[in-house]
Image (cartoon, rainbow, N blue to C red):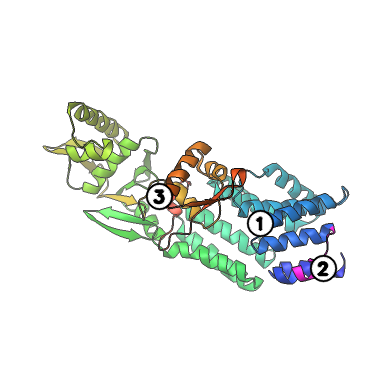
Amino acid sequence: MDSLITAAARALAAGDALGALKWVALRDDAPALALRGIAMAQLGDLVRAKALLRSAARGFSPREGVARARCLVAEAEIALASRDLSWPVKSLDAARATLEAHGDRLNAAHARYLQVRRLLLIGRLEEAEHTLAQLDPTNLPPALKVVHELVAAGIALRRLQTKVARGALARARLAASQANIPALTAEVESASLVLDTPAARLIANGAERPLLLEDVEALHASPALVVDACRYVVRAAGKAVSLANRPVLFELARALGEAWPGDVPRDVLLARAFGAKLADESHRARLRVEIGRLRKMLQTLASIGPTKSGFLMAPCRAREVVVLAPPVEQQHGAVLAFLADGESWSSSALALALGTSQRTVQRALDSLAAAGSVQAFGRARARRWMTPPVPGFTTTLLLPAPLPSD
């Protein structure tokens, strides 16, 4: 490389995108285009950055396989930042293999971390953890150590392992100070906020209070029977019964949990489960059927019996019954949980992350847009959705990831 390319590369490594552009802004050769693309990505112009990187990849000759692989890795990072989760993973894997074969271990490791971050984003924790375990950050530069620890913290947070997450974030903060890149330091501080903001609400004995993630972790380790409205499960003593696909049964379980140790009148259960304002005999018959189904599903955790006015939940071994609810109740909360990161998402990326159909996501986005909760920009395939992060609480428990007993 010539001296200008070398100077620009060093500026980018230090996080100085404007400084890098001063060296290569007027050049249109392939190495300069690649560095300009990375600089534009650091400055937030992802569309221009992607175009520059693709031009650079076309400009390198077939014999310059390593340079083209580096362009592919940079493009994959832009795709991840712009939440283009449908970006071809096989291309990134091929680029990583090329880099490893030619001894470029740092960029190969960076490609691995991109793969892990994508897996974490779509909730595939087992694969993310397995891939991360293959990476040893000991001999990596501080910037990549920050990425390693942030990914480790993200996995721990999804698993409600708050002590592990705090340790990873402490190591990330130390590595960020060594890297001396303000953007990395800001990213670590932003990730740390998740541990210090309310993640859920505890509803028990007619009262409610906010909980931090470590409080939620302690709650799951307690002898209480927890009706979890964040994951739609009922759990106690290491056992969990999922009601995610049974919304009526879960609503009945939640109503019974919120009323414990008292009972819930039949008309209240009818209104909450079926929306019935004026109940007739058919509604009452359906309620008896659904209560019977719920009783059968929860038979190892709690019993549900009739009272004079309604029904009562009694835990089998737990000392009490509590309800764990999201910090803010709102329709399409899972969609909002992803959009709350402040990034722009396509409906296809949201569908992939949520494991549902794109049409379902589009209906949810249209509903949220009509309510003013989200906004869109762009058209057709370039259409993106975003919303500012909601201040004062974290959406970690709304993201699709298994909890320890799942």
The magenta segment is: 21-29
Disc 3 marks which residue?
371
Q: Residue 149's image quarter?
A: bottom right
Q: Nearer the viewer, mark 3 or mark 2?
A: 3
Name the residue at the left extreme: 308
Density class for disc 3 (Cα within 10 Å; few <14, some 14-19, many ≥20) is few
Residue 25 lies within the magenta run: yes
Q: Is residue 239 above or below residue 202?
A: above
Q: Quadrant of the N terminus?
A: bottom right
Contact between marks 1 and 3 (CB within 8 A): the answer is: no
Going by the numbered disc 2, the residue's amino acid type is Thr
Disc 1 marks which residue?
46
Q: Is residue 304 left or right of residue 382?
A: left
Mark positioned earlier in the residue sequence (2 or 1): 2
Q: Quadrant of the C terminus?
A: top left
Mark positioned earlier in the residue sequence (3 or 2): 2
Q: Nearer the viewer, mark 2 or mark 1?
A: 1
Disc 2 marks which residue?
6
Q: Residue 131: give x, y in percent of width and height.
A: 63, 49
Distance CA(mark 3)–CA(mark 2): 51 Å
Q: Residue at x 75, y 54 (%)?
A: 53
Q: Is residue 33 left or right of residue 313?
A: right
Element assignment for label 1: helix
Q: Nearer the viewer, residue 23 or 156?
A: 23
Element assignment for label 3: loop
Q: Residue 393: give x, y in percent of width and height.
A: 41, 60
Q: Is residue 81 visible?
A: yes
Going by the numbered disc 1, the residue's amino acid type is Leu
Q: Is residue 164 above or below residue 397?
A: below
Residue 117 lies within the magenta run: no
